[in-house]
Amino acid sequence: MTDQAIYAGPMDVPDVGTPARGRLPVLGLLVRIAIGVLIFWIIARSIDISGAARVLSGLDVGLFAVATGLIVFQHIFAAARWMSVCRTQGEPIPFRVALAGYVEANFFNQALPSTIGGDAYRVLRARQAGQNFGVSVVAVFVDRALGLLTLTLMAVVGAYYLSQIPSAALTANVLAAVIAVVVGGAIVGALLSTVLPALRRITITRPLYWLSDGVARVFKSPVATVETLGHSLIGHSITAVAFLVLARSLGLSFDLVLAFVALPAILLAAAVPISFSGWGVRESASVVILGHLGMPAESALALSVLLGLSLVAVGLVGGLVWLAESVMRQDETATDEARPASAALAAAGGPGPLDEEPEPDVSASLTPRKREILAHAELVADSRDAWITKNRSYFADDRGTMRFLVNEGARVLDLGCGTGDLLARLNPSYGLGLDFSPRMIRIARRNHRGLEFRVGDVEDPATMAGIDGTFDYIVMSDTIGLLDDLETALNQLHRFCGPETRLVISYYSHFWEPLIYVAEKLGFRRGQPQANFITDTDFANLLHLADFEPVRSEMRQLVPMRLLGLGTLINRYIGTLPLIRNLCLRRYIVARSLRAQTPRDMSVSVLVPCRNERGNIEPIVQRMPRFGSRQEIVFIEGNSRDGTYEECLRIKEKYAGEWDIQVLKQSGKGKGDAMRKGYDAAKHDILMILDADMTVPPEALPRFYRAIASGKGEFINGSRLVYPMEKEAMRPLNLIANRIFAWLFTYLLNQRFTDTLCGTKVVTRAGYDRIAANRNYFGEFDPFGDFDLIFGASKQSLRIVEVPVHYKARVYGETQISRFRDGFLLLRMVVFAWRKLKAI
């Protein structure tokens, strides 16, 4: 499902503007502070404050810093929860706004007495990002309610734990009552707008309806529910770990279980809005709950105070971020006031030789968002190549993967080419780069004179209509995230596609958005305009809508830095492992145009490698069905001892009037050598392998022909492991090994294989020529012949399709395969494939 299907449309909440400040918030804040001071005074009368101070004096500052860092880190997941909530309300906010808003809100919550609470500040932050004020209020309320609900659900474990302690029965009952109220309130709140829609028509109850509708929008979507509660659970869990680290920093005996039992209840108490920033209430709750768990009152008070100090430190971090953001906004405002967008674009070109050739102005037809992206591109154009050099490890890995996916010497169209560095690295026979930034194109032309570059918008039909011919590869490196209409843009690309054309899209995983934001703040990544949020599922859906079919995908770069060579080793040997590779930064998708795949009437060469198969030669010809526009049978005899070669010659003469038959004698050894000899001699469009043992019957070949001639696949592999086999067709040990190797090669090739060892394989002449032309990448490594084709087809991103076959028992001769000797060879193939296809 897409986001449009998961999330509801915009809320019908009026934009009432940003409310003005008044005296009531100040009075409320003073009352909260007074109550906090009163609660502290009561605690001081019953607890030895000097004892708590002694516990605090033994603080391990290093562990305190670690705990504070963990609390800062959990804001990433809190921000992700807020983003998910905003999407359900129909007005999403960028992740950087959500994260900055959460971190800065701590400044107002913890560090300074302020007339604005943290949640009110988040409303203001969302409002500045363009969100409707009414929606902002609802979203922040719903976000806070979901955080409280998750905390309450976590507290269920604590309530049960405390109920087992006789002295804690009252505390457990109070906690259970709070849990019941919060959970019940969540249920009622989510149902209220549905059960009582009339609330919307009454002025005094309308806000209650909007809040209820906001909660309901989250729970109506299973995806949104899992996202929000999942992010919240992870965030609270990280805080519990930080609580444990704080306890250890004071030298207290405490474990993770107790942290998960105590902290939710303590935070629930601190959420009661009767004291400033939770001070006082949190300390009281800590003394009571931790006391039930066996911690002395002085230690519990010290630990709670330390938690508060950690939150103050986090608030100070938020204050620094707030100050930095304020300065940046002032600078941007001053720049905008001093120089309008049109002047900025004109000045960005700068004087000098790059401005000698005037370029077409594409800005007039752009949307406001695209104009902002264009302005950014113009401003960073001069420093782009220096930036690539500065981050050479990241870009070298990315360019290396693109070179792996795109053959040298091909015709390449690079959409969104920037300064042309990627296109140049691909070393095309003809390369055309398109970008809507005139400054980028001028730099590209200066630096890469052997390539062609044009100014134009990828989404402009007139621009695309001006490009002639078809290409072997169409490259979109990070371009897809900046387009306004992805489906329309992809639909325009079919005009450049032939049957073998490959669309190569590279993008980054949004799992990394929190770290990317931090990297931008620290200067490790250049700031970028807001990009489209596209998941792997969205990619598949968009390609399907635009009639493109994904044929392979890659995930690379677990560590986007060299780190003295350690990052390279991790990316090569750890980042490519199953499950772990899903955490990688870069995503690569290779697709083909379905509109270019038209059914054709093609000619066929059936290649039959044969060694000691004399009794099967004539039955093969007798049972061979007719298919294709023309057909030939090519026997490649491998120095048999039973007269197979002589039998092939006899059959060729006997059926000369009925069949076009070639007989070749192998000079080398192995099936791989035989197949290469046969491919060189074959005359027709489709090349089929049929093993001479006829365990895959000749009658199955028309199904392979239909699969490839219809365009459904470009490399067709037989699968013997779908239908039941004849008795003794395959020994049990072979069957087990086949299934294991199928799983391994599915992982290695990123395309599904159920039977890599089936001898029946079909490829077009064009596909085989591409494999053969790039065989030097793998070398002469394969004595079987199967893996030369499989690895080559995967490397060339051919569409691989499997055709199930009925596997028969051999009726003549003996198998040429040794289970153990060839089994070890297959293991070597696995290692070889991993090195050449994964550890690159």
Image (spheres, helix red, strand yellow):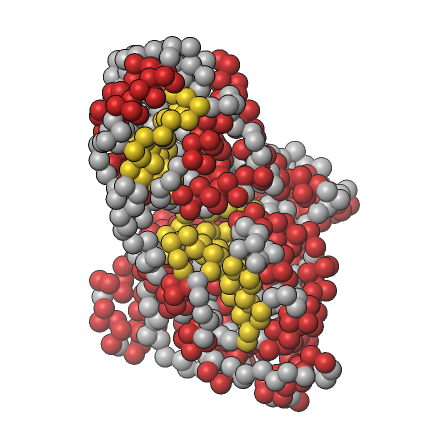
Snapshot quadrant of residue 681? top left
Residue 783: % across, % down: 51, 24
Residue at x 22%, y 66% (from the top left corner): 196
**455 on left or right of 811:** right
Residue 92 visible, this angle: no
Closest to the observer, 189 or 236: 236
**65 on left or right of 678:** right
Decide: is 387 above or below 703.
below
Residue at x 52%, y 28% (from the top left corner): 782
Residue at x 65%, y 58% (from the top left corner): 519
Closest to the observer, 529 or 506: 506
Residue 692: % across, % down: 34, 21
Snapshot quadrant of residue 26? bottom right
Closest to the observer, 609 or 405: 609
Residue 58 visible, this angle: yes
Closest to the observer, 764 or 44: 764
Q: How many marks?
A: 0
Residue 634: % across, % down: 36, 30
Residue 119: % across, % down: 51, 67
Decide: is 347 above or below 89.
below
**345 on left or right of 83:** right
